[in-house]
C-alpha cells in the first residue's frame, strides 16, 4: 500500500498547519469508502462554515467532491489518499479564489497578497484489520503582506479549528465501524 502523500513536496514551511487523525477498527478500504461518503450536511458545524465561505455549495455534496471542484483543484491522488489545493485571499468575506487548473498551477502560484492552501487526506493501515484516517491542512502566504493578514485571520479563528477540524473524520470512523448500512 502507498505510504501517502509527501506534503512538503506541495507546500513546505507553512505558516499554519492543522492535523487531525482518527483510528478505526476496520481495514483501510472500508475506512476510505466511509470517508468518501461524508457529506457537507453530515458534519453540521464544519458544513455551515464551508457553505458560508463557499456560497452555493450543496448541503448534500460529499466532501470528497467538494475538494474536486472550484475553488479547489485536485493536485494528486491514489488509492487511499488525496491532495487538493486552492489559492487566493482567504481572509476576504467575498469569494476571492482564482481558478487553478491543477498541480502545475498550484506549484507555480506566486500572486502577491495571497496564500496557497493545501488539504490532504489519507489512510494508513495499522495492521490487524485496523487503520487510521488522517487530515492535514497547510497555508503558506506568498509574501509579507499575506503573512500579516493570515496571522490576523488565524488569531481570530484558529482557536475554533480544534472544535470543528476533526468533525468529518469522527463521522467517517463511526460509519466505517458500523458497517455499510450506516
Image (cartoon, grey):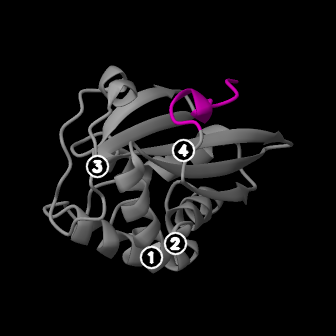
The residue most toward the right is: 128
Kindly identify which residue carries mark 4.
121
Element assignment for label 2 = helix
Horizontal relation, residue 44 to residue 51: left or right: right
Residue numbers of the magenta segment: 1-12
The quarter holding residue 152 reads bottom left
Element assignment for label 1 = helix
The residue most toward the front is: 144
Kindly identify which residue carries mark 1.
157
Q: Position of residue 49 (x, y in %)?
A: 33, 72
Kindly identify which residue carries mark 3.
113
Specify few, some or many for label 2: CA neighbours under 10 Å numbering under 14, 14-19, or 20 or more. Answer: few
Q: Position of residue 84 (x, y in %)?
A: 41, 39
N-terminal-most mark, 4 or 1? 4
| Residue 5 in view here | no
Instruction: Find the distance from the CA under tag 1 to the CA under tag 2.
Output: 7 Å
Kindly identify which residue carries mark 2.
161
Disc 1 + disc 2, Cβ < 8 Å:
yes
Q: Main secondary structure of the magenta part?
A: loop
Horizontal relation, residue 3 to residue 72: left or right: right
Which quadrant holds the N terminus?
Answer: top right
Is 2 a magenta residue?
yes
Amino acid at each position: 500500500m502507498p505510504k501517502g502523500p509527501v506534503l512538503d513536496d506541495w507546500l513546505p514551511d507553512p505558516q499554519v498547519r492543522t492535523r487531525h487523525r482518527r483510528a478505526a477498527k476496520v481495514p483501510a478500504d472500508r475506512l476510505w469508502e466511509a470517508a468518501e461518503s461524508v457529506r457537507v450536511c453530515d458534519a453540521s458545524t464544519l458544513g455551515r462554515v464551508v457553505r458560508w465561505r463557499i456560497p452555493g455549495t450543496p448541503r448534500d455534496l460529499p466532501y470528497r467532491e467538494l475538494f474536486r471542484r472550484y475553488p479547489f483543484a485536485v493536485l494528486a491522488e491514489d488509492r487511499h489518499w488525496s491532495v487538493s489545493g486552492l489559492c487566493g485571499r482567504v481572509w476576504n468575506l467575498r469569494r476571492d479564489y482564482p481558478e487553478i487548473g491543477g498541480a502545475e498551477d498550484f506549484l507555480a502560484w506566486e500572486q502577491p497578497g495571497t496564500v496557497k492552501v493545501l488539504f490532504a487526506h489519507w489512510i494508513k493501515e495499522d495492521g490487524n484489520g485496523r487503520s487510521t484516517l488522517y487530515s492535514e491542512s497547510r497555508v503558506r502566504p506568498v509574501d509579507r503582506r499575506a503573512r500579516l493578514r493570515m496571522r490576523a485571520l488565524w488569531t481570530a479563528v484558529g482557536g475554533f479549528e480544534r472544535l470543528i477540524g476533526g468533525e468529518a473524520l469522527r463521522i467517517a470512523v463511526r460509519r466505517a465501524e458500523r458497517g455499510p448500512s450506516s
